[in-house]
Image: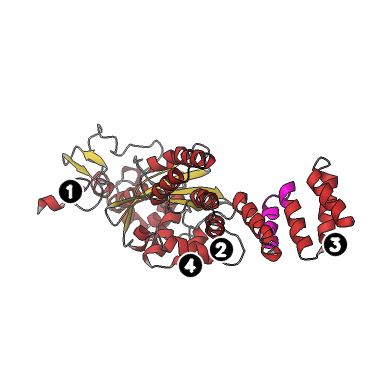
Amino acid sequence: MLNLFKTTRCQNCYTERLMRDCPRKNKKICWHCCNELRCDGKCPTSCAYAPREVENSPFPSFKADSQSENSDVIKLFIDLWSGRPHPGLDNLAPRKLAADDPQRLLEWLSGFQFPSTFPLEYLMQKLALPHQNIPPLIDPESVVSEYLDCLISLEWNELRQYTINTGKLPDLAERYAELLSSITTLKKVDSYSILNAGLGENGGSAIVYVELNHKTDWTFVLTFKDNNWLIRQNIAGSPQHYFAQNQIYTQIAEALGKADDAKSWELLEAALKIYPDSADLYYYRALYWQLVKQPDKATVDFFNAVALDNGWHEPYFHLGAIYLAKKDFAQAEMWLQELVALHPDDPNALNNLAAAYAGQNKLTEAGQLWQDLVHRFPGFELARQNLERLNK
């Protein structure tokens, strides 16, 4: 039976992913088991994960690989700390003092500064002290947790609210749900554990590394936008795959540039297994469909790219051009208006939008737009020619 346990499992609980060596147990254990041990403060100081005293604070610091781990261990510490005699409180246990003289305990606690990540509301509740509700910290891990909770509940239409996508065009939200629900691994999620998380150097991006169903590596890439953390990408693997993707994209772009359709397809198929919701890959696949003369499939994949990244202008431009070529000017106008909203100073986008107006006999709108283009971009000959042709 022991052979059934994977070597990646914690040697203490046999459930979670092993993360570190434990000198107390002489085993490789997960962070959950580590927290349950180290919260008592009895770990040897030689261990990097042993608690460290903090000057002018009643609470130690704990090394942690994620905010989830940090919050968990501090709460476990609070559970023990609240019932232990404390020298700063005349050797009274905080829980006892909270019952007998809550104001004194509140005044004592108010003399310390707590980091924003400290579970202060949990402390107040544990001690039954009066307090104002403290909004939960919105961090990358909490966003990922809510996203994964929706996945477990199969609430596909609720996922998009946690992402970078806010486009109002019809069907974008529905297509996002369709694309995510087609990812086999995500359809089977019933549990998850956060393994690691970290911020980018500029603080505007984050990576959250999780294990799905106690067996599958999965990584989320997030962006800080509009004072919130938003999911930008799912990766079927570890964070190393995030750092490898630019090279893969370059290889695909080079194969497409050489019109090597066989190599392009091979690279695309392999990459989509690792980066299943990459707007870049759907965009490259659309270019592949154009290369092999399958324009309808190209149109679908340009649309998929937009659905996965509403703020990326390239797929909009291609969709506008496709519908202009088809003389479906209403569709062209829709996509080009979105493009212009994203990039109001793009002369090519504005020129194509004017062409979509002209194709629908909206000559006044087309003329005004071309005239404005000629004024703003005197060297843009195509707009000048279109305006002259319109005025003949």
Q: Nearer the viewer, residue 160 or 122?
A: 160
Q: Nearer the viewer, residue 100 or 272?
A: 272
Nearest to N terminus: mark 4 or mark 2: 4
Residue at 72% over, 48% down: 348
Q: Kindly identify which residue carries mark 2.
A: 172
Alpha carbon distance from label 3 to label 4: 40 Å
Q: Kindly identify which residue carries mark 1.
A: 12
Q: Is residue 188 above or below residue 57?
A: below
Nearest to N terminus: mark 4 or mark 1: 1
Nearest to N terminus: mark 3 or mark 2: 2
Kindly report which numbered mark, 1 or 2, lies closer to the viewer in this rendering.
2
Q: Residues within 10 Å of mark 3 (few under 14, many from 20)?
A: few
Whether residue 298 sits left or right of residue 129 in the image: it is right
- Secondary structure under tag 4 reads helix
Where residue 165 appears, as percent x and y from the top left, is 55, 57
Q: Kindly identify which residue carries mark 4.
A: 157
Residue type for callout 3: Thr
